Amino acid sequence: MKLPGRSIAAASLAAPLLIATAALSAAPAAAEAQPAPPPGCSGPASATWLNVTVSGVRNGNGVIAVTLYADDSSKFLVKRGSLYVGRTDAATGVTRACIFVPKPGVYALALYHDENSDGKFDRTGVGLPAEGYGFSNNPATLAGLPTFKSVRLAVPKSGLTTRVTMKYP
């Protein structure tokens, strides 16, 4: 049995519920808006960037060079193999940098403390490092260079922070 007036009451409640549901479903889209990259973020601008916190910096001389590599082991640590080298002024203790990456994905970072600001990683006469260095994921380097697998870093979205500890000879 159908009661008079019930269908009108249900319809009058349905409209406000539909409007409220639509408003709630639009709210997450607004909350997911991309934050702006920090000032001084280096590299070719893109919608994806990575914050790099470098600890163990022994002095404020020169710059910290942050080298970005694609997920390709054949290009890691080879001349002209990087995507980009960003540089930021060194600060004793902790230096913060930001580097744009082309898009979310897997990358590798190699850093060095260019204390004399000559734009290159200095080595001793026998080929050992003469300046501080570090890699994404802070792999062990006692027996030589790290494997590419040990420095691979997933960057699924913008604004993430990775921490690298500098090592000095």
Image (cartoon, helix red, strand yellow):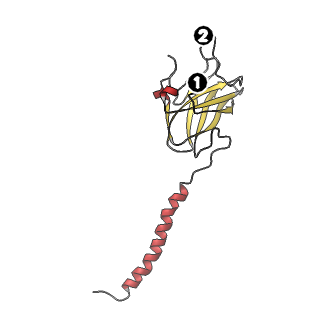
The foreground one among 87 and 93 is 87
Residue holding disc 2: 126
- Using residue 7 as the reference point, say whether residue 43 is left or right of it: right
Disc ID at residue 55: none
Q: Residue furthest left?
A: 1
Residue pictured at 62% horizontal, 22% vertical? 132
The foreground one among 144 and 55 is 144
- Residue 142 is situated, as x and y percent measured from the top left of the image, at 51, 17
Disc 2 to disc 1, C-alpha distance:
19 Å
Residue holding disc 1: 79
Question: Marks 2 and 1: which is nearer the front?
Answer: 1
- Using residue 10 as the reference point, say whether residue 70 is left or right of it: right
Q: Secondary structure at mark 2?
A: loop
Q: Which of the 4 quarters of the picture holds residue 122?
A: top right
Q: Is residue 169 above or below residue 134?
A: above
- Using residue 38 as the reference point, say whether residue 109 is left or right of it: left
Residue pictured at 37% horizontal, 84% vertical? 6
Q: Which of the 4 quarters of the picture holds residue 54?
A: top right
Image quadrant for the C terminus? top right
Given the image, on which type of amino acid does mark 2 rest? Answer: Val
* Crowd class of label 2 (few under 14; some 14 to 19; many from 20; radius 10 Å): few
- Using residue 166 as the reference point, say whether residue 62 is left or right of it: right
- Residue 7 is situated, as x and y percent measured from the top left of the image, at 37, 83
Q: Residue furthest top?
A: 126
Q: Is residue 44 above or below residue 140?
A: below
Given the image, on which type of amino acid does mark 1 rest? Answer: Lys
